[in-house]
Amino acid sequence: MVSSLNVEVEVGDGRRKGNWWERVLDLSEAKTQVKFVVPMVLCNVFNFSITMVSVIFACHGKLELSGSTLANSWAFVTGFDVMTGLSGALE
């Protein structure tokens, strides 16, 4: 039986009955995964913000904007992405 306070109560056959999300979601596992996910998300946000900030500062003309975009593309392809791939291979 479930009380009106949604407290877990043992049913006659030994099973516990609670809220549906407690039966579906393992909160300790979710907390562990969030601890791993937050640094990766922040790393990707900062990585993409490098391009965004440089394009924002170079938006005074078409030539400057295209030059900044090409430079960022070249830097990411030749440097940042290669180093990210190599450091990821070390794990």
Image: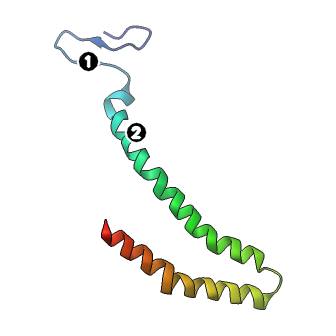
Q: How many marks?
A: 2
In the depicted structure, whether residue 50 falls above or below residue 32? below
Measured from the top left, where is residue 14 in percent x and y? 18, 14
Instruction: Kindly identify the amino acid type of the residue bearing the numbered disc 2.
Output: Lys
**Crowd around label 1: few <14 · some 14–19 · many ≥20 (10 Å):** some
Q: Nearer the viewer, residue 89 or 63?
A: 89
Q: Which residue is mark 2?
A: 31
Instruction: Kindly identify the amino acid type of the residue bearing the numbered disc 1.
Output: Arg
Residue mark closest to the camera, 1 vs 2: 2
Residue 43 appears anywhere in the view: yes
Residue 90 relative to residue 5: left or right? left
In the depicted structure, whether residue 49 falls above or below residue 36? below
Which image quarter: residue 71?
A: bottom right
Residue at 32% from the left image edge and 72% from the top image edge: 89
Helix, strand or loop at label 2? It is helix
Label placed on residue 16: 1
